Amino acid sequence: DAKTTQPPSMDCAEGRAANLPCNHSTISGNEYVYWYRQIHSQGPQYIIHGLKNNETNEMASLIITEDRKSSTLILPHATLRDTAVYYCIVIGGSNYKLTFGKGTLLTVNP
Amino acid sequence: DAGITQSPRHKVTETGTPVTLRCHQTENHRYMYWYRQDPGHGLRLIHYSYGVKDTDKGEVSDGYSVSRSKTEDFLLTLESATSSQTSVYFCAISESIIRGRNYGYTFGSGTRLTVV
């Protein structure tokens, strides 16, 4: 299973873009990159996923490098409610079980 | 979250007593999962199910059993609760991986279990 590496914490000013990096250098061709977040004491929430193309939805954008060894989750205009732990997860092929690492604690400051 | 509910939301029980947590879904999803979350450990998979009566162990299955007699319900049982099982338990569901390679999970709101 591909492993991911994320910084343990990041800060962002309210209204600015938050860029959360993730390294997944051992990702294989049929594995997707998924992002979830967990706001304090709530269940994790799906944000976005991608295979090799950049993706955008109403919550965020996902930029995947051409070699697929890393990706960046972008929250274009962070708000205080975006303060959460963000998890980057690689999953695919016959592995359909989400495995959570420690994630990145994003703190959005006023 | 809509479509998935956990019960109870909170429970305090004594060491040595049996406890059953329930996860109920209305999405008709094939896959269901039980996770526990503890400070310093993040979310860890206990058991999962890939269909009615089809279950398998996750990374921290000792002391837990599960049952899935129908699509919508996935039960997690602590046969004899211990203080080390004090945790927040999350249930999750996901669609069949056959359709559209969707690995997106939906999580419940969690059950906070305290074993005293």
Image: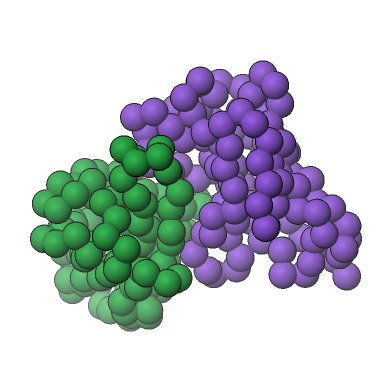
Chain colours: A purple, B green
* In the foreground, B22 or B19: B22
The C terminus of chain A is located in which quarter? Answer: bottom right
Q: Is residue B6 above or below residue A75?
A: below
Is A24 placed above or below B50 here?
Answer: above
What residue sits 58% from the left and 60% below the top?
A38
The answer to whether any part of residue B31 appears in the image is yes
Q: Is residue A98 left or right of residue A71?
A: left
**Res B20 quadrant in image:** bottom left
What percent of the width, then of the height, locates residue B60?
Answer: 32, 47
Residue depicted at x 37% and y 69%: B3
Q: Position of residue B116 (x, y in %)?
A: 33, 76
Q: Position of residue B101 (x, y in %)?
A: 41, 38
Q: Nearer the viewer, residue A28 or A1?
A: A28
Q: Residue at x 34, y 72 (%)?
A: B6
Q: How many marks?
A: 0
Q: Is residue A11 visible?
A: no
Residue A59: percent from the left, percent from the top? 67, 57
In this rendering, would B97 be left or right of A53? left
For the N terminus of chain A, the quadrant is top left
Up/down of A44 relative to B19, above or below: above
Q: Is residue B87 left or right of residue A24?
A: left
A26 over B24 or under it: above or below: above
Residue at 59% from the left image edge and 53% from the top image edge: A47
| Residue located farthest toward the front when viewing the structure as drawn | B100
